[in-house]
Image (cartoon, helix red, strand yellow):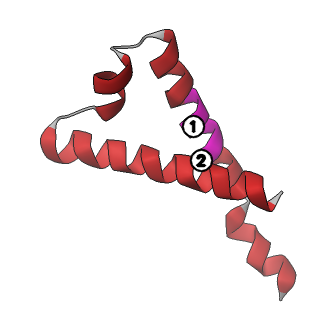
Amino acid sequence: MEILQKVCLVLTIIGAINWGLIGLFDFNLVSFLFGEMTMLSRAVYSLVGIAGLINIGLLFIHLDTK
């Protein structure tokens, strides 16, 4: 499970960087690399979204260990 959480954390960081680029420079890295709403870019957006949902669990893990 720890490996899955680390992969999800990396995907969430990638998503955060992409949102930062959109907000600061109006540049969408995912669209630049994979095209505007192609199946591949939709897959990237979906994976980042699912990773973010999985990372919600990281908020509560440390509560269980105390």
Q: How many numbered dots are placed on residues in this image? A: 2
- Give amino acid for label 2: Gly
Residue 14 visible: yes
Mark 2 touches mark 1? (CB < 8 Å): yes
- Write the residue at 67% across / 67% down: 59
Helix, strand, or loop for circle 2? helix
Answer with the quarter of the image where residue 55 lies. Answer: bottom right
Q: Is residue 56 visible?
A: no
Q: How far across and down, in percent of the image, does residue 42 sit? A: 50, 19
Q: CA distance from mark 2 to mark 1?
A: 5 Å
* Image location of residue 65, percent across then percent down: 85, 83
For label 1, the SS is: helix
User: Badge 1 is on which residue?
Assistant: 49
Magenta stretch contains residue 63: no
Position of 13 relative to 19 (above/below) = below
Residue at 55% x, 38% y is 48
**Residue 52, numbered circle:** 2
Q: Which stretch did the figure color magenta?
A: 46-52
State whether residue 56 is above or below residue 34.
below
